[in-house]
Image: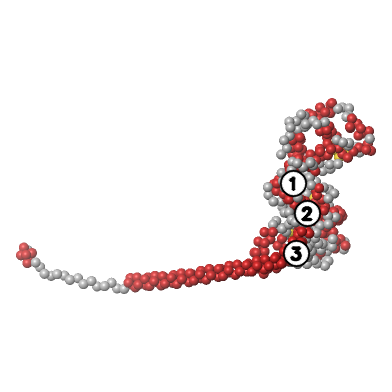
């Protein structure tokens, strides 16, 4: 963590007022900027170009923009000048207070504005210093990147693959190898493949599918090949993928060509991002196509008959949905385990074998080494290793299959034996129960008969002999 020294000056409202009073006459840098408007690009809003500053002011300006998470870090306002001058003159400011105050303000402002606006760019409110700390204490094996105190380069430069000039060539590695662990570090839980709000918005136009190392989207009525997207899809990337699929051969384009009522309706929300109209969507589609992502085969997808109804209402040829036993298992699944559990419930052993075959066939065309979330060997080494291990792999596979079949047979035999024993025990209990029932019936019958018979006559003998003594006394 950062251990900041005690500040020499406190940046607050009083500081700004004092600075303003002490600098009623413009400071030398500001005076030079305004005298050379062409160079320093002074705007009516009070913004200045960071690129027009000389060293070391340009570095201080960039630092302020990064510290405050400004969306456009190429310009700065006049209010930053006190901090910039303090920074270049080695004055220690209360950076922790500035960071936290600005962070809280940015979050509150973002939350308030998202309620009333259709399009609002979220601030990068992790802030540079928080992200620096996370990166310094984290390992990113997919990027082969681990910072140490001995590194000569400042932490905030980060890895070259993240730079604007090269990120397109490493998008899978950045999303799967950087964003996934960073999210887990911050929130202490796995990153969702798609944000909750975006998943709700998507239900009106399509569905997302979660594979083990990638995600993809299918739009109702589109015949475009879906892009193989990273594990984590940002709202903007989702909007651009939807835009790409409706801009290709699709129900949307068929309705447009026939000048019928369009589908989907605009503006189309995708979480925090919005496609305003079809023209905007076609423009955004070109941006995701420039990434040259891998694709998977398309399929007629319209389980809710959304595209079907849109075409039927326009009196055009219908779009028929086709089931896919393998593909449908991955709808809205966060893990491969969910898809496998669903497959066990829906299909028998033969069905599972067919699903595994179809999935392996689909994965063979994809660069799985780039999609991996753990380090892998280079592609050439991987090919050579696979060539060497093919016979062993086949042999091991057959052995595993034989062991699996033997285990399954033993399991079936065990179940049959248990079932047989259970039935025999039930028969025994049934026989004993019947015998007991018969004994009870017999006993009840005997008792009933004894109660209904005439009572036996009792012979009473009267002794008529009289004792002589008693007779004499009498």
What secondary structure is marked by label 3? helix
- Asked where in the image residue 441 lies, by quadrant, the reply is bottom left
Residue 212 visible in rendering: yes
Between the C-alphas of marks 2 and 3, the distance is 26 Å
| Residue where numbered disc 3 is placed | 387
Q: Residues within 10 Å of mark 3 (few under 14, many from 20)?
A: few
- Asked where in the image residue 95 lies, by quadrant, the reply is top right
Q: Quadrant of the N terminus?
A: top right
Q: Residues within 10 Å of mark 1 (few under 14, many from 20)?
A: some
- Asked where in the image residue 377 lies, by quadrant, the reply is bottom right
| Residue where numbered disc 2 is placed | 172
Q: Residue at x 6, y 67 (%)?
A: 468
Determine whether, in the image, residue 246 is placed left or right of residue 140.
right
Place of residue 77 in the rendered image (x, y in percent of width and height, measured from the top left): 85, 36
What secondary structure is marked by label 1? loop
Task: Mark 2 and mark 3 in contact? Answer it, CB < 8 Å.
Answer: no
Q: Nearer the viewer, residue 265 or 74?
A: 74
Residue 101 visible in rendering: no
- Which of the marked residues, 1 or 2, is nearer the chain's N terminus? 1
Q: Residue furthest top?
A: 22
Q: Residue at x 82, y 50 (%)?
A: 167
| Residue where numbered disc 1 is placed | 146
Q: Residue at x 76, y 46 (%)?
A: 115
- Which of the marked residues, 2 or 3, is nearer the chain's N terminus? 2
- Which of the marked residues, 3 or 1, is nearer the chain's N terminus? 1
């Amino acid at each position: 963590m950062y251990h900041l020294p005690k500040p020499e000056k406190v940046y607050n409202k009083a500081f700004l007022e004092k600075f303003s009073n002490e600098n009623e006459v413009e400071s030398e840098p500001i005076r030079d900027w305004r005298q050379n408007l062409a160079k320093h690009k002074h705007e009516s809003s009070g913004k200045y170009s960071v690129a027009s500053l000389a060293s070391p002011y340009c570095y201080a300006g960039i630092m302020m923009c990064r510290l405050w998470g400004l969306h456009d870090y190429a310009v700065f306002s006049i209010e930053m000048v006190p901090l910039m001058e303090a920074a270049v003159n080695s004055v220690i400011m209360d950076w922790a207070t500035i960071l936290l105050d600005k962070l809280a303000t940015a979050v509150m402002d973002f939350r308030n504005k998202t309620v009333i606006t259709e399009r609002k760019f979220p601030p990068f409110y992790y802030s540079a210093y928080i992200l620096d700390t996370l990166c310094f204490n984290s390992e990113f094996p997919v990027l082969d990147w681990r910072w140490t105190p001995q590194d000569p380069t400042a932490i905030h430069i980060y890895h070259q693959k993240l730079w604007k000039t090269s990120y397109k060539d490493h998008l899978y590695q950045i999303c799967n190898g950087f964003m996934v662990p960073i999210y887990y570090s911050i929130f202490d839980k796995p990153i969702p493949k798609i944000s909750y709000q975006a998943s709700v918005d998507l239900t009106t136009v399509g569905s997302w599918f979660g594979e083990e190392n990638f995600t993809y989207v299918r739009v109702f009525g589109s015949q475009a090949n879906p892009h193989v997207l990273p594990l984590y899809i940002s709202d903007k990337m989702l909007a651009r993928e939807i835009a790409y699929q409706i801009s290709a051969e699709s129900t949307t384009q068929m309705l447009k060509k026939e000048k019928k009522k369009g589908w989907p309706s605009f503006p189309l929300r995708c979480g925090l991002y919005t496609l305003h109209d079809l023209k905007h969507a076609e423009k955004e589609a070109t941006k995701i196509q420039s990434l040259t992502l891998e694709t998977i085969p398309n399929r007629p997808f319209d389980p809710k008959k959304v595209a079907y109804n849109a075409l039927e209402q326009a009196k055009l040829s219908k779009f028929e949905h086709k089931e896919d036993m393998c593909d449908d298992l991955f709808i809205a699944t966060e893990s491969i385990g969910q898809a496998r559990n669903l497959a066990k419930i829906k299909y028998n052993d033969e069905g599972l074998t067919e699903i595994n075959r179809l999935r392996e066939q689909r994965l063979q065309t994809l660069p799985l080494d780039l999609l991996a979330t753990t380090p892998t060997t280079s592609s050439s080494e991987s090919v050579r290793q696979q060539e060497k291990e093919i016979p062993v792999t086949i042999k091991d596979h057959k052995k595993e299959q034989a062991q699996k079949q033997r285990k399954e047979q033993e399991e079936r035999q065990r179940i049959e034996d248990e079932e047989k024993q259970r039935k025999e025990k039930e028969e025994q209990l049934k026989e004993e129960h019947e015998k007991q029932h018969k004994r009870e019936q017999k006993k009840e019958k005997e008792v009933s008969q004894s109660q209904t018979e005439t009572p036996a006559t009792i012979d009473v003998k009267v002794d008529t002999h009289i004792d002589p003594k008693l007779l004499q006394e009498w």
